[in-house]
Image (cartoon, coloured by chain):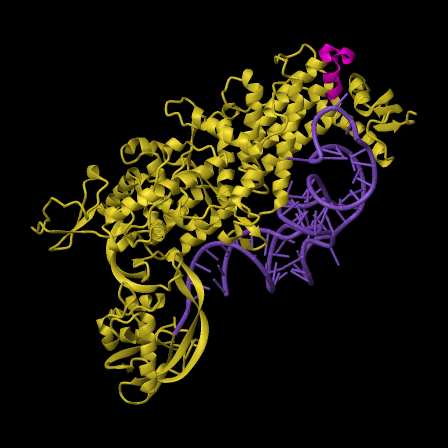
Chain colours: A yellow, B purple
Amino acid sequence: MLDNKYNIEEKEKKWEEFWQAEGIYKFDPNSKKPTFSIDTPPPTVSGELHIGHIYGFSQADMYARFNRMLGKNLFFPLGVDNNGLPTELLVEKQKKIQAHTLPREEFAKIAQELLVSYNQKYKNLIMRAGISCDLSLGYDTIDNRSQKTSQKSFIELAKSGIAYRENKPSPWCTKCRTSVAQFELEDKDLDSVFNYLNFKLADGSGTIPIATTRPEFLPACVAIFVNPEDKRYSHLVDKLVKVPLFEDRVVKIYADSKVGIDKGTGIVMCCTFGDQTDVEWWKEYHLELKQAIDDGGRMTEICGKYAGLKTTDARKAVIEDLKAQGYIYKQDAITHSVKVHERCEQPIEFLTKKQWFIRTSTPELKQKWAELGNKLVWHPESMKTRYMSWVENLNQDWSISRQRYFGVPFPVWYCAACGKPHFADIKDLPVNPLSTEYNGKCECGSTKFVPESDVMDTWATSSVTPQINTNWFDDEKGASKKIPMDMRFAGRDIITTWCLRTIIKAYYHQGCLPWKELLINGWMMADKGIKISKHLSNSKMDLNQIMQTYGADVVRYFSASGAYGRDVMFNDEGLKDGYKLLNKIFNGSKFVLNFLYDYTPKKPSKILPVDEYVMHKFNDAYNKTISFYQDVEMGYAKAEIEKFFYFFCDNYIELVKNRLYKPEIYGEEAKQSAQWASYNVLFKMLQLLGITMPHIAEEIYQNYFRTFEKEKSIHLTVLSPIKLDENKTIIEKGDELIEVVARIRQFKSENKLSLKTEIEDVEIVSHNVDFFKLCSDDIKAVMNIKDLKFSAGEFDVKIGKIAE
RNA sequence: GGGAGAUUAGCGCAGUUGGUAGAGUACCUGCCUUACAAGCAGAGGGUCAUAGGUUCGAGUCCUAUAUCUCCCACCA
């Protein structure tokens, strides 16, 4: 028997434990069923947990559950990403230590210990949301399997020349002391001062005005640029200019169209490196390289008296000196947007370092990425455009070196004599070159080697999740049969980063796509135009509070509102809708089960028209729901079966209530007919509703259906429509019957009568008189009609007098 | 500055190929009906962001503008 009231938190936790204990979601490697494999994006454990995290996972889980109920063997792992800089910063903050002051192994040990609880916290949340992952398939992006996989990937790419090491200027964070990828940068508006300087022409013929916000870069000034279209300055091209404060140094003036005529004074100094444009000019004009800033953001020796100062202090000192010597003729306070490192908000610099890159940006490769993008099935289709336009604009190779401490090491040593890289043996992986000697001899004869001290960027690992999942390290043949995996889901912000990089790796290693289908979910927004953020999560959006009050099923219900891939606004009302349905499912089932507990399902010899009608009506809803799920429209699918469920309660149950209650009046046969229809429809409805709301479905299944259905969980049962004899007209006739009831209800409502008010006589005019005659008892009972008459003709309902 | 998406009832949303605007919720009116008042029935409520255009006909197609979201670029 079901409880009188459904205790959400208690029951949900109970069934979650049951699913784990019974291994309901376990992947069976020996199964004969077709496999459906999901490449779950491992979430970053260092992130703040909020309701938005459940959103994307829930939708993916619904698609996963749908596929499981089609009879597939699900491969649905749950990894966590705890590799790289975000995690390193988290550990530093939590443990109040600094990674660069400790031996790497020691830091890693502290990190691993701390991460245990973070990993668990994340997994707990995902499990608490009823996501049907198989935890035993899980991995950490810093564990042995992940390290081996990313190191093997690196060695293979390096040996084939796809990964290469080069001295390249790249964005550098002086606070985190590492190079950072372009997409780790964000814009921030900062106050600054535009300093207008007079540079002296070397031939003594006068001065030229240049505006700069970074005067401390003067020691690294290697050229001056003007726009070739700018008539004011065309006579200056090729002339030489003395660098203020460093007048022994002379630089040339070039003309280049990248100079904005109306920006500043229209004359720019190029320093190595103030920004991306400087980098481009440096390359294009083969300029000198003068590094004015070191790893930690201090001025280098080339800066003379300013050496050793931090950039901000150097800027002050330089400005003082410029003023004292009369170079500055104007200063304007401005606010401009500056590229900062997204993790620490420190403005980034450009530094030149030897780093590993992966080739991604040649025209042929870009063509390839576009081709692969076209072969991938996108949900929704429109998201492909983002990918395509990114690929089109791709102009830099992928930098994977990070000068950090907590991450996957590069398994490589360099010959001390000639610099040639020597790689670890694949069978020895994972390898940390800092703690392992290279026992070999270089072709040049040297036996001395320098270990690589950089670690790989997180993305180098999170882009090989298909290879981790399919155990590519140990079994290349097996993996190549399993890749492409069936499906991957992701937020739309990482299409261009995570997804593209995973596609690139799979292409290099397996020569194909990493997955067949890509599901891109939208975002849950806190309010119109407001993203969910930490400080919102402790108010109305507090996750614990929501889980306690409404539970996972309701949050999942809310996650399935609307069209797939669209943003959704968080609101309490949405949760209340789900709560309403949850309650209704419980009560409706409880009521129906009351008449089923002493019943063993068996097809009755006679099925009454109303019962036949509701089963056909269900099959209709079933087909629509299935087809929505096939189109990856979890919201529409949910809405379809929800609509039918309300129809079942408000119309069908009301119609057959009396037959179930009073077999002594209506007959045992009539009761059995209703029981048969109720059993089938309720069970199959619960299967479909359970895709969205797995806990309540399990509660009811275990309470009754488990006795007759083979599977030990409703989530292992296979979907199918109710087997019925064909009856083409039954839906149309039944709908007319529902219309009769609606008319009488309307009549009573408009006349402010109770619904149970007795009516003397009603006449139904219809072309389906025979059908109505067979339903006479049900109609009379539900509307309390004393005398029901029928006549043939155009449909109408004639309502007579109210009984006294 | 460029690209993509969005804008529909008080609210959060749906609206396939152009053909009289849809459900839910809230509000209002009734009904304590032997599962559920977290219920049932009924009613009202919209110049489809704005301005143009194509068409016999536009929420739907085109152009521009505004606002929001995401991505990218610029930022001397």
Q: Position of residue A354 (x, y in %)?
A: 24, 58
Is residue A773 at least partly visible in the picture? yes
User: Which residue in the rendered view is the most extreme toward the left?
Assistant: A445
Magenta region: A656-670
- Please, is residue A283 above or below residue A202 in the view? above
Quarter-wise, where is residue A38 in the image?
A: top left
Q: Nearer the viewer, residue A101 or A694?
A: A101
Q: Could you tell me which residue is drawn at 46 percent across and 71 percent down?
A: A335
Does residue A666 belong to the magenta stretch?
A: yes
Q: How many numbered discs, if any?
A: 0
Q: Main secondary structure of the magenta part?
A: helix
Viewer can see residue A463: no
**x and y percentages locating residue A726 in the rendered image:** 66, 19
Q: Is residue A769 left or right of residue A229?
A: right
User: Viewer-proximal residue, A342 or A771?
Assistant: A342
- Tell me where residue A355 appears, x and y as whole percent: 26, 55
Quarter-of-image position of residue A399: bottom left
Vertical position of residue A750 compared to residue A397: above or below: above
Q: Nearer the viewer, residue A788 or B26?
A: B26
The residue drawn where x is 37% and y is 32% is A137
Residue at (46% x, 38% y) in the render: A126
The picture places residue A667, in percent across and down from the top left corner, at: 75, 11
Left or right, A522 with respect to A282, comes to right
Q: Is residue A592 magenta?
A: no
Quadrant of the frame with the N terminus of chain A: top right
The reply, left or right, for residue A496 in relation to residue A55 is: left
